[in-house]
Image (cartoon, rainbow, N blue to C red):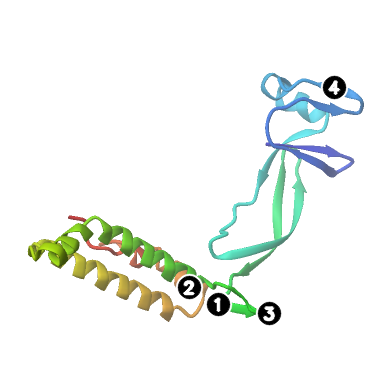
């Protein structure tokens, strides 16, 4: 990506190589591949990057551009942690991070159980026993789901929730501490 800069102002962001008109001069898309960085800079085109963000946990606002000698970077003025709990305004509920991650955990549990659901269906329809290793696995998945949900709901803030994604030296991160699949 590139930024078109004029008089220390970003005029526009160019997402990919394409023809551009700068000061009434038409330039083909090939300039982005064949011209040097210095040649592009001479007509006001700089490499462009965006500040990395963690949109899973934070909201960002008040972006601005840092125009350096050789590049332009978009940066955020404000980083605000997303709400941990659900927020309802005028009968519209926005899920908080706890609900989002509990729902994700339930979905993961469902996916893990779905491969063995046919055993349970067979038991109900034909009274053929579910193998003990399958029952043990299904119980372990449900227990892991409950443990993860309890840990999510115990998080007081975003930092505590983010810590659930950190792997200890001897295992899985708490957010992904599921039993091994069959």
Pointer 2 with pointer 4, Cβ within 8 A: no
Residue hosting label 2: 99
Looking at the image, do the residues carrying marks 1 and 2 touch, with CB atoms under 8 Å apart? yes
Which disc is residue 90 wearing? 3
Name the foreground residue: 111 vs 144: 111
Q: Quadrant of residue 72?
A: top right
* Residue drawn at (27%, 58%) of the image: 114
Between circles 4 and 1, the one closer to the viewer is: 1
SS class of the residue under badge 3? Answer: loop
- Of marks 2 and 4, which one's residue comes earlier in the chain? 4
Task: Report how far apart the C-alphas of labels 3 and 1 lie in the structure.
Answer: 13 Å
Label 4 and label 1: CA atoms lie apart by 52 Å
Quadrant of the snapshot with the C terminus = bottom left
Q: Nearer the viewer, mark 3 or mark 2?
A: 3
Q: Which residue is mark 1?
A: 86
- Which comes before the other along the chain, label 1 or label 2? 1
Q: Which of labels 3 and 4 is toward the front? A: 3
Are the residues flagged by discs 4 and 1 in contact, CB closer than 8 Å? no
Return the x and y of residue 60 as percentages of the image width and height. Answer: 66, 62
Rendered residue at 19%/70% (across/down): 139
Q: Position of residue 142 (x, y in %)?
A: 26, 70
How far across and down, in percent of the image, does residue 78 sit? 70, 65
Tag 1, which secondary structure? loop
N-terminal-most mark, 3 or 2: 3
Looking at this view, is 111 or 124 the one in front? 124
Please state if 17 lies on the left or on the right of 10 as rendered.
left
Residue underneath mark 4: 26
- Say if 115 sits above or below 140 in the image: above
**Distance Cα–Cα, label 1 vs label 2:** 7 Å
């Amino acid at each position: 990506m590139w930024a078109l800069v004029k008089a220390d102002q970003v005029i526009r962001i160019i997402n990919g190589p394409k023809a551009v008109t700068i000061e009434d001069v038409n330039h083909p898309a090939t300039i982005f591949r064949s011209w040097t960085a210095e040649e592009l800079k001479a007509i006001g085109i700089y490499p462009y990057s965006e500040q990395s963000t963690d949109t899973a946990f934070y909201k960002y606002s008040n972006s601005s551009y840092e125009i350096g000698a050789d590049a332009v970077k978009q940066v955020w003025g404000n980083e605000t942690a997303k709400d941990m709990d659900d927020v309802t305004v005028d009968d519209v509920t926005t899920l908080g991070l706890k609900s989002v991650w509990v729902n994700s955990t339930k979905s993961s549990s469902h996916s893990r159980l779905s491969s063995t659901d046919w055993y349970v269906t067979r038991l109900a329809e034909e009274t053929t026993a579910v193998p003990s290793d399958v029952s043990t696995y299904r119980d372990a998945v449900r227990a892991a789901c409950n443990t993860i949900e309890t840990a999510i709901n115990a998080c007081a803030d975003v930092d505590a929730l983010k810590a659930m994604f950190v792997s200890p030296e001897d295992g899985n991160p708490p957010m992904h501490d599921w039993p091994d699949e069959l």
